[in-house]
Amino acid sequence: MLNQDTQWYKLHYPDSFVGDEQRMIQRTLAEFVDRGIMPVRHNIDDDVTHEEMIEPILKGLQVDLGWQKSMVPKQCGGNEMMSLVTAALKQEELSRADDGISLASACVDWTLTPATMAYFFATSPTTKVWGKAALDEFAPKFVEDHLRFGCFSMSEVQSACDIENHLNEARLIWTKATRSGNEWVINGAKHWASDSGTAHLHCLACNMDPDSGVDGFTLIYIPEPWPGVSHGKYEAKCEVNGDRNASTYFHNARVPKEWGLQGLEAWDVFLNNVVSAFAMNIANCTGMMQGAVDVPLEYPGQPVVGGKPIREHFPTAMFPGEMIGAISVARGTFLELCHPFDNPAVYGSWITDSMVAKARSSLSLLARMANDLIPRRMEFMGSQGLCAGRALREILPRDIAVAKRVLGGVQLGFFSGRRALYEMDFSSFGLSKLKKAEAGTV
């Protein structure tokens, strides 16, 4: 991590965005990363069962440092760490070592956030009651001294990123929720959700009737193990293996009605939760770029050509300069983006066209930038890059490619950016086919 006593650090993490407590948290996380992840990060992808390295790392982070209860209210025994700036600083530090570990941790917060936001900030009594019911039931599991996982389950095979496209108004969600007396009955399947297969709790995006759009949209909490919930095999991936992915199937899974929220109120909670993740993923990109530039700076300081180290030659020095520029821009972007999220009384709702445009388009641009730069570090390292360690040769170039695909992908992000300038319908149903839902506030 950058030395907090230097001007360079203060320029990257200015007082206007980062307070003393956040700097302390950042330092603690950096020490954890340097001590617990960096020495083994090149072997993390080989931990197929997650038992040898991944789960011990996550237990140290989530349980020993308390991050799995960061979104749990204090009255429930949690840390109530509500600042997105703090969360983004965590994501940057973790991604500097391993993006899969970063995602696995973040998705626990992402699962609990809908209930916590509803409980603290909802103007609707129905939404607030739903948030309290979910926290009363499930928060105690996340403050225990046992490693827990959470899954924000929304992706489906037949619609993929169309679910994340808010203009589709939930009409492409086919996982169905029906009411039967005092219960919700769930049928359908989710695929590729982070922490699926390991999750102790799902926040599940459903629809009572896809044709009804937002009116039938439903958010339901469902724990595991639970009758009617099953999984396919873990996906065999070539990247971000610290984060599990498996298909999850729901067959007449029944949960109490108090665990579900329906309609526009549920849709507002869902959109707020999705939008909050954009800045987190920019922080992930930033951390991976930092991780890609740290080690290459060491290697070219050793070989000597023409009487001086390789890295002192002008052509070689171009690459780290370009990376530093990209990291500076990315770091400034996620901090500046998190600040309005942390101050909605000043900047307004998270889910307006303006906020979504800024957040999505920034993520798309910086994910592409990082995806372009990280694989090019071999130009800087030359033959040294072949023996610089597996994390730099293989893992980071693969992991950064994932950043372009999550949360709907870069194209959806750029389309959202256009709506800051002029109205544009990029739904799956064509121009003017959808009734525009009125943006609300959780």
Image (cartoon, grey):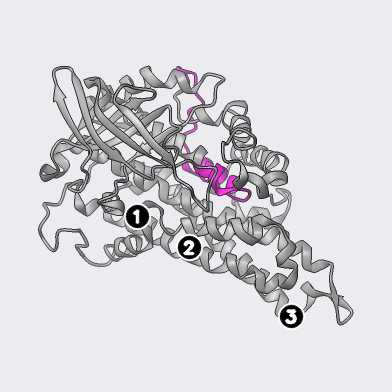
Mark toward the start of the polypeptide (1 vs 3): 3
Amino acid type indicated by mark 2: Leu
Q: Which mark is residue 119?
A: none
Query: 240 or 295, which is in the foreground?
Result: 240
**30 relative to 342 in the view: left or right:** right
* Residue 336 horizontal/vertical position (percent): 48, 54
In this rendering, does residue 442 appear at all? no
The span picked out in magenta is 74-103
Amino acid type indicated by mark 3: Phe
Q: Quadrant of the C terminus?
A: top left
**89 relative to 257 in the view: left or right:** right
Above or below — where is 165 with respect to 32? Answer: below
> Does the stretch in magenta take in 108?
no
Measure the C-alpha gap from mark 1 to mark 3: 40 Å
Q: Circle 2 sits on which residue?
A: 366
Image quadrant in which you'd find residue 195: top left
* Residue 236 horizontal/vertical position (percent): 48, 47
Q: Residue at x 68, y 58 (%)?
A: 8
Q: Residue lying farthest right?
A: 307
Count of all numbered marks drawn on residues in the image: 3
Q: Secondary structure at mark 3?
A: helix
> Does the stretch in magenta take in 99?
yes
**394 relative to 139 in the view: left or right:** right
Mark toward the start of the polypeptide (2 vs 3): 3
Q: Secondary structure at mark 2?
A: helix
Q: Residue at x 63, y 41 (%)?
A: 26
Say which of marks 1 and 3 sits in front.
1
In this rendering, does residue 153 appear at all? yes
Q: Circle 1 sits on which residue?
A: 408
Q: Circle 3 sits on which residue?
A: 314
